[in-house]
Amino acid sequence: MVNSRVPAEVFPPGEFLADELAARGWSQTLFAEIIKRPQKLVNDIILGKRSITPETATDFAQALGTSAQFWMNLESAWQLSKVPARDDSISRSAALHDRFPIKEMMKRGWIVIDDALLIDGQHRVGALEKAVCDFFEIASINDEIEFRHAARRNYQKNVSAHQWAWIFRVNQLATSLKVSPYSEAALRGRIRDLERLMLEPEEIRHIPRILLECGVRLVIVEPIPGSEIQGVCFWINENRSPVIGLTLKGDQIDKFWFDFWHEITHVLNGDGKTEIIIDDFDESKPVKDKIEENANREAANHCVPIGVMRDFILRHDPMFSEKSLLGFARIVKRHPGIVAGQIQRRTKRWELFKKHQPRIRHIITQTALTDGYGVAI
């Protein structure tokens, strides 16, 4: 009699039915009468001309003392056995999309596939794999991503593929810029010029030119969703040319200047030569790295001198007034939004003076080499 196990070798379900009827001494006609179905249906199933439906499987189970699932398993196994062998393109495509932000990279033109390589509207997976390998400068799609401008490799395993995609795009754009040889002395000599730009939002447009004159490459790249990255600092050309990449997440005057001075501090200190510096500026995370602590401290000091800012807060906290904010901003020669940002950071009162923090993304992207935010390269 039939049991409920599906054999490893696949046979048509009709063969099992014929064997079961023979073992019981039942004719097809009798069996058809028992299950109240046409005799032709039973015959067609035995001959392999008809598939077993859930309803038929239920009738067979009741008549033969098995389970309906047994007959459905036989039918499914038989139908699958008739499917011709497929190539591995589906699994390869799934692996690509699982590891890399393929859709976003294609949408933004970071990887481009010739339309001649389309099949039914889908790109050949081989062409897609090659494009990804070329972008990340790896020989095989299974290779670990390594950033060739960083000497130390052990930390790179903690960088996500979404972050790597953004970083590699920053690198592509940065290498296309023509800059003067980097001079630390020249950059330090322009600090005051850069600080003078902090009075009005529109003055931000001069930053890229000043940095290029000092040999610093500034690139703006819109972040990939989920990348959790705000800025980056690394060096190219055998550690002779610094690169700053920014996402402009947050799009506020105070956030921009803090992020900017943070990365400038990394450049002046030579950070990013042995390992790429990746910053997310997450206020909720404690900063334990001394390099980052120093960069944060210097960034805050450039935004508003730390001692002066501390004294102002001690005098006015918790009753900050708009009049005091504007008056203090004039004294320190900073835009009120920058001062507001420092007050928010120190007091954790993020709602204070929000109306004084204008957006600046549309200004800096007019003069900085930018990918994204509606800017055409």
Image (cartoon, helix red, strand yellow):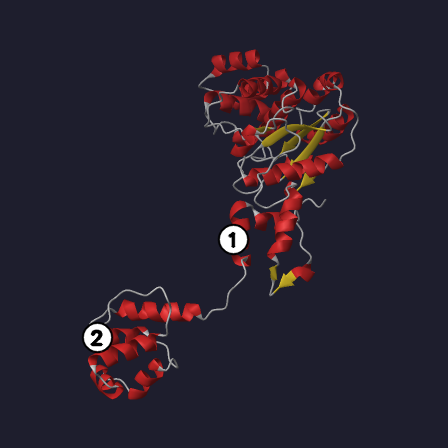
Numbered label attached to residue 94: 1
Residue 196 lies, with reference to residue 75, above or below; the image says above
Up-down relation of residue 122 to residue 112 (above or below): below
- Residue 321 lies, in percent from the top left, at 50, 21
Query: Which quarter of the picture shows residue 73?
Result: bottom left
Dot 2: within a 10 Å radius of its alpha carbon, few (fewer than 14), some, or many (20 or more) residues? some
Label 1 neighbour load within 10 Å: few <14, some 14-19, many 20+:
few
Q: Is residue 372 visible?
A: no
In the image, 34 versus 120, the foreground residue is 34
Q: According to the image, label 2 marks what residue?
A: 64
Viewer-nearest residue: 142 or 106: 142
Distance in Å between CA atoms under marks 1 and 2:
43 Å
Badge 1 marks a residue whose secondary structure is helix
Q: 104 or 373: nearer the eye?
A: 104
Asked if one can make out residue 346 in the rendered structure from this viewpoint, the answer is yes
The picture places residue 297, in percent across and down from the top left corner, at: 56, 17
Left or right: where 50 falls relative to 101: left
Residue 108's place in the image compared with 239, above or below, is: below
Seen at 62% across and 64% down, the residue is 119
Q: Amino acid at mark 2?
A: Leu
Quadrant of the image occupied by residue 57? bottom left
The amino acid pointed to by label 1 is Ala
